[in-house]
Amino acid sequence: LYVSSLANIVQLGVNTSSPIATFALQGVGGTNPFSINSSTGASLLNVLTNGNVGIGTSTPKTGVGSGLHISGSPATLRLESTASGGRTYEFRAEQTGQSNAGFKLWDMTSGGSILSISDNGLIGINSSSPLSMFSIQSKSGVNPFRINTFTGGTVFNVLAGGNVGINTSTPNAKFEVWGAGNVSSTFTLNTFSASGTSTFKIDDAGNAYFAN
């Protein structure tokens, strides 16, 4: 232990006679430099000789290089903004075997899931329980999906009411296309009455007719 008070600046060094900070800790070969445990001996915070930092684990590991390892059930990392109107988010690794197991990003301010990756690889946006490889759940008053060109022009748009538009941002039918199109394979177009009866057809040979 070394205490320096040069120029009225107190610096405390452990295992070093030249502390470079207010509190400086230098490890010893083969011994981890820092550890904090609970009253029962459970690991709370650990720094290993290889630079890995563990929260909730005494053996932090990373896939590549040195990094931060958080262990818990669930393991959680919280980001909270203290600015006016700031929001709070949590990254969570949920417990395997639960219905919402996997990786989650939660908006703790509004209480909803922003991003979810299940333990079998399903990805959900605004959904904590995705039902397909890529699932989007819309919010009230917001259209669920849109693709634009680099200039902002609409390429593909899905409205909250279920209408789908190609080259239009305001499709007025279940499926609406603006612009010229080309079909190089079999194509059949049907229109149906309110009762579900086919009333008009264009078959793959280009024949158009009203159905009886």
Image (tube, rainbow, N blue to C red):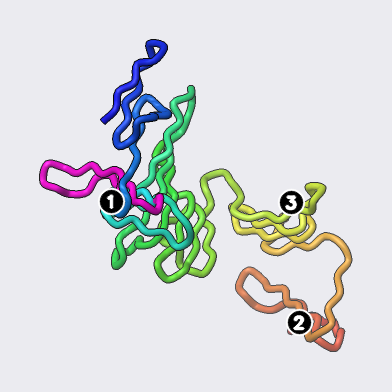
Q: Earlier in the sequence, mark 2 or mark 1?
A: 1
Figure check: 19 above or below 57 = above
Q: Quadrant of residue 129?
A: bottom left
Numbered circle sitting on residue 169: 3
Numbered label tally: 3
Residue drawn where x is 25% and y is 44% of the image: 35
The residue at the far bottom in this view is 205
Q: Earlier in the sequence, mark 3 or mark 2?
A: 3
Residue drawn where x is 32% and y is 64% of the image: 99
Give the class, few, some or many, for how many residues have Cα within 10 Å of label 3's Cα (few <14, many ≥20): many
- Distance Cα–Cα, label 2 vs label 1: 74 Å
Residue drawn where x is 61% and y is 58% of the image: 162
Residue that label 2 marks: 188
- Distance Cα–Cα, label 3 vs label 1: 63 Å
Q: Magenta residues?
A: 32-51
Residue that label 1 marks: 31
Residue 7, horizontal then vertical, whole percent = 41, 11
Is residue 65 rendered to the left or right of residue 6? right
The stretch drawn in magenta includes residue 198: no
